[in-house]
Image (tube, rainbow, N blue to C red):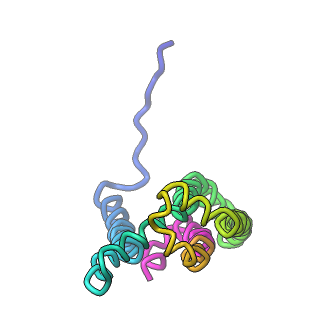
């Protein structure tokens, strides 16, 4: 009922800790910006070349495909401590084994989601958008490939983050 807290000497001094955080954080911030640019910034670019109706059609397609990449991102955050622990305990070999399993899990899930999109995507678009974007429904398989590519890449990025290799994530 009366805990006794003992102040231990910190393993790292504040200056060293701040330098370590800056070393990792600057690459993590840069990688986040690049990730955002690759996933969202092209809306601004394509709106210059396409009609607004075409941009809206692309967004309607993505609304069908984006739930799984969001799920993969959330699962990656849940797996990250385990991958980091595997790196701390067993080094790169532990990460390789863990990332292989997670990447396979993500890829199988993405393939199943892509199959769902191929089977039910046009019907789902017709239901959600009352047939308004039916002219774009034939592009669902192409946009759906993003789901698989994203899932596999997130598995590999998870390994790099677990090894605290933020600069490699950026590259």
Point 51% across, 62% down: residue = 66
In the orientation shown, which residue stands out farthest toward the bottom? 49
Residue 122 to residue 1: above or below = below
Tell me residue 33's x, y (percent): 33, 72
Q: Is residue 87 left or right of residue 115?
A: left
Q: Is residue 171 above or below residue 64?
A: below
The residue drawn where x is 71% and y is 68% is 115
The residue nearer to you, when weighing 74 against 19, is 74
Q: Which quadrant is the C terminus positioned in?
A: bottom left
In-image side of 135 versus 56 (left or right): right
Observer-nearest residue: 169 or 56?
56
Where's residue 105, x and y in %?
72, 63
Residue 150's spot in the image, x, y percent? Answer: 56, 72
Q: Camera-side residue: 9 or 162? A: 162
Magenta part of the chain: 149-171
Task: Tell me the chief SS of the magenta region.
Answer: helix
Outermost top residue: 1
Which residue is located at x 42 percent, y 68 percent? Answer: 59
- Please state the horizontal and vertical placement of residue 165, each as a whole percent of the image: 49, 73
Query: Furthest-front residue in view?
Result: 131
Taking depth in this image into account, of 20 and 50 the one nearest to the observer is 50
153 sits left or right of 33 in the view: right
Judge whether residue 171 can be spotted in this image: yes
Residue 80 among magenta residues: no
Q: Does the magenta portion include 160?
A: yes
Q: Can residue 153 be seen in this view?
A: no
Query: What residue appears at the point 55 percent right and 65 percent down from the top-left corner?
Result: 65
Q: How many labels does the image show?
A: 0
Q: In which quarter of the image is residue 137?
A: bottom right
């Amino acid at each position: 009922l009366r805990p006794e807290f003992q102040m231990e000497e910190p393993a790292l001094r504040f200056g060293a800790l701040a330098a370590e955080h800056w070393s990792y954080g600057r690459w993590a911030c840069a990688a986040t910006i690049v990730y955002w640019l690759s996933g969202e910034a092209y809306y601004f670019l394509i709106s210059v070349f396409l009609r607004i109706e075409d941009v809206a059609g692309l967004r309607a397609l993505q609304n069908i495909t984006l739930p799984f990449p969001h799920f993969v991102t959330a699962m990656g955050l849940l797996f990250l401590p385990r991958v980091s622990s595997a790196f701390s305990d067993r080094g790169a070999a532990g990460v390789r084994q863990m990332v292989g399993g997670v990447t396979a899990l993500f890829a199988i899930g993405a393939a199943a989601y892509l199959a769902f999109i191929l089977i039910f995507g046009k019907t789902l678009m017709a239901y959600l958008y009352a047939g308004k974007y039916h002219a774009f429904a034939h592009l669902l398989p192409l946009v759906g490939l993003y789901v698989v590519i994203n899932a596999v890449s997130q598995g590999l990025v998870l390994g790099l983050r677990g090894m605290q290799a933020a600069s490699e994530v950026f590259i």
